[in-house]
Image (cartoon, rainbow, N blue to C red):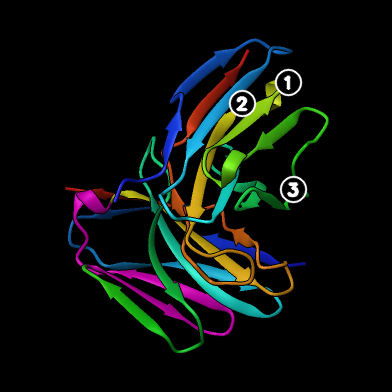
């Protein structure tokens, strides 16, 4: 069964303390892996799409990487405004191209 | 570019009542999605439209939920009658391309439904 698992469920960091969020997946026929950011009371906001193992994308303090089994969202020297829930979703041929979503990691950055 | 518009932002109803949500996607986006998001979970697809045709409604509880997209633009999602377990945020999203293509979704801010 196609599945996406995110860990940890929640992560508390001090401002400036770098860390990584994990998204592991078991799907057949990966077409793309998406990272979204969701603020309280808002809809998810698109961050990155990764298509193949070895690919990396960067945006400000965020860097997303992809292997054949998982993706990491690395956050370098985070600021309080980076606090949000980060969602991972996978699109695969076996799931009729519908996105399979993880439950998200809630990131809290303390000043 | 204007984002995905949804209304209302909040709705409180009693069980067995009916409710409707409205969505206006980004101009030019052919594909429109309705998702249900329960607190602490990822979004769950309810229905996907390509222009004004249904592409996937396999997870839509059709005995109580209905959706339409007239003229391939705006869409409405209706629940009748509502149950307690329908309490969730209902998100509308749109994308430039549709089935089989890899294209990011653009989400509205959702409607938070509370059923008492």
> Which type of secondary structure does the marked residue at label 1 adopt?
loop
In the displayed orientation, state which residue is furthest to the right. B63
Residue B55: quarter of image: bottom right
Residue plotted at (46% across, 63% down): B104
Q: Gap between marks 3 and 1, in whole Å?
A: 17 Å
Labels 2 and 1 positioned on one and the same chain: yes
Label 3 neighbour load within 10 Å: few <14, some 14-19, many 20+:
some
Residue plotted at (45% across, 33% down): B6
Position of residue A1 relative to residue B23, above or below, is: below
Q: In the image, is residue B33 part of the stretch drawn in magenta?
A: no
Q: Position of residue A102 (x, y in %)?
A: 57, 57
Q: Mark 2 — residue?
A: B87
Of badges 3 and 2, the one in the foreground is 3
Residue B62: quarter of image: top right
Q: Mark 3 — residue?
A: B57
Determine the chain carrying the residue at label 2: B
Q: Nearer the viewer, residue A16 or A87?
A: A87
Q: Nearer the viewer, residue B43 or A98?
A: A98
Q: Position of residue B60 (x, y in %)?
A: 74, 41
> Which type of secondary structure does the marked residue at label 2 adopt?
loop
Residue plotted at (35% across, 44% down): A39
Name the N-terminal-most of marks 3 and 2: 3
Name the N-terminal-most of marks 3 and 1: 3
Q: Nearer the viewer, residue B52 or A17?
A: B52
Determine the chain carrying the residue at label 3: B
Q: Mark 1 — residue?
A: B80
Residue B4 placement, left or right of B57: left
């Amino acid at each position: 069964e196609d599945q996406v698992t995110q860990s940890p469920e929640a992560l508390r960091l001090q401002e400036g303390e770098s860390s990584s969020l994990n998204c592991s997946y078991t799907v057949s026929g990966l077409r793309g892996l998406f990272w979204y950011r969701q603020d309280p009371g808002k809809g998810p906001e698109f961050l990155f799409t990764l298509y193949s193992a070895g690919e990396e994308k960067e945006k400000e303090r965020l860097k997303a990487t992809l292997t054949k089994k998982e993706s990491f969202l690395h956050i370098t020297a985070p600021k309080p405004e980076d606090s949000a829930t980060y969602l991972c979703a996978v699109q695969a041929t076996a799931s009729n191209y519908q996105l399979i979503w993880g439950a998200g990691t809630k990131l809290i950055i303390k000043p | 570019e204007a984002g995905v518009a949804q209304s209302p932002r909040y709705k409180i109803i009693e069980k067995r009542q009916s409710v409707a949500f409205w969505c206006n996607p980004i101009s030019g986006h052919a594909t429109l999605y309705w998702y249900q998001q329960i607190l602490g979970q990822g979004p769950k697809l309810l229905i996907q439209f390509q222009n004004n045709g249904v592409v996937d409604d396999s997870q839509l509880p059709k005995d109580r939920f209905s959706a339409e997209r007239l003229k391939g633009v705006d869409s409405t999602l209706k629940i009748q009658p509502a149950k307690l377990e329908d309490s969730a945020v209902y998100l509308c999203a749109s994308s430039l391309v549709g089935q089989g293509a890899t294209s990011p979704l653009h989400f509205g801010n959702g409607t938070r439904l509370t059923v008492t």
